[in-house]
Image: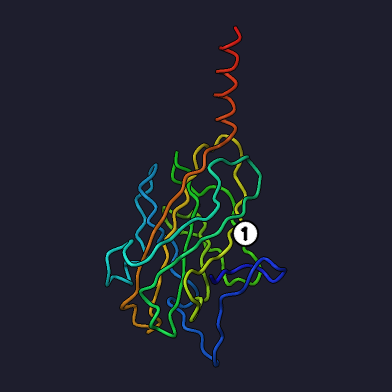
Amino acid sequence: MMRVRDKVGLSFIPLLLSGVGIVIASSGGPPASRTGAPACGTKTAETTCRGCHSDFAIDSGATLQLVNAPNFYVAGVTYTFSVRIASTQTVGNAGRVWSFELTAVNMADGNGAGTFANVVGQGTQIKSGSGQYSTRRYIQSTTDAVGATTPVEWQVQWTAPDPGVGSVGFFATGVAGNGTGSNKGDWVVSTSSVMQDVTATEAISWGKVKAIYR
């Protein structure tokens, strides 16, 4: 399994730099706001990478996972988890490429929630959204894992927002591309996960405890 992490023993860098060229599915990383996040608050639903890579139905031919993403968060705490994409559809393509984009959304109002940080050396960047998505931040691949074998994994660091935000949704899309540069024959997948504010959970639990011993 190919993983993408930093240079201090976390894992390997999945950039196979053969020759002088690196195939990039979208130069400088994918456009922002392509995670498929649903309509929330006053924000309309985001599109996905199928706007360019449209040969196949979404979520067919590949899988995308948020590995070890917690179900609960504590304000101000930094959490580390991974984005993992897998597919056997492009196994016959020596120049196959892989990419992803992920955002965190306050499920109450649709604004961005928390703060992403790059893990050094793995080929990711953070972009800002624009227009109605201007408060959202997107962590995404900048250079694709050219020629890497399935699955491919990038590490993500996210610091939780202040208390009171409530539920935070994580929405991501990924591309398993054949590396031809034509955006044809590429597979697009999506995934999501929701974290609950542990502060609210604790308040509810304590209320139940007090009621029992009255």
- From this view, report whether residue 211 is shown above or below residue 108: above
The residue at the far right in this view is 8
User: Residue 20 is drawn in which quadrant?
Assistant: bottom right
Q: How many marks?
A: 1
Left or right of residue 57, residue 204 in this image? right
Question: Quadrant of the image for the C terminus?
Answer: top right
Kindly identify the residue that appears in the image at 27 percent across and 64 percent down: 57
Amino acid bearing label 1: Ala
- From this view, report whether residue 67 is shown above or below residue 92: above
Q: For label 1, count other residues whose C-alpha is less than 10 Å away and answer few (under 14), some (14-19) or many (20+).
A: some
Q: How are the colours assigned in the image?
A: rainbow
Left or right of residue 51, residue 66 in this image? right
Give the percent coordinates (x, y) of residue 203.
Answer: 58, 25
Give the percent coordinates (x, y) of residue 162.
Answer: 61, 40
Kindly identify the residue that appears in the image at 46 percent across and 58 percent down: 65
Give the percent coordinates (x, y) of residue 161.
Answer: 59, 44
Kindly identify the residue that appears in the image at 54 percent across and 24 percent down: 204
- From this view, report whether residue 102 is shown above or below residue 2: above
Give the percent coordinates (x, y) of residue 191.
Answer: 41, 55
Name the residue that disc number 1 marks: 117
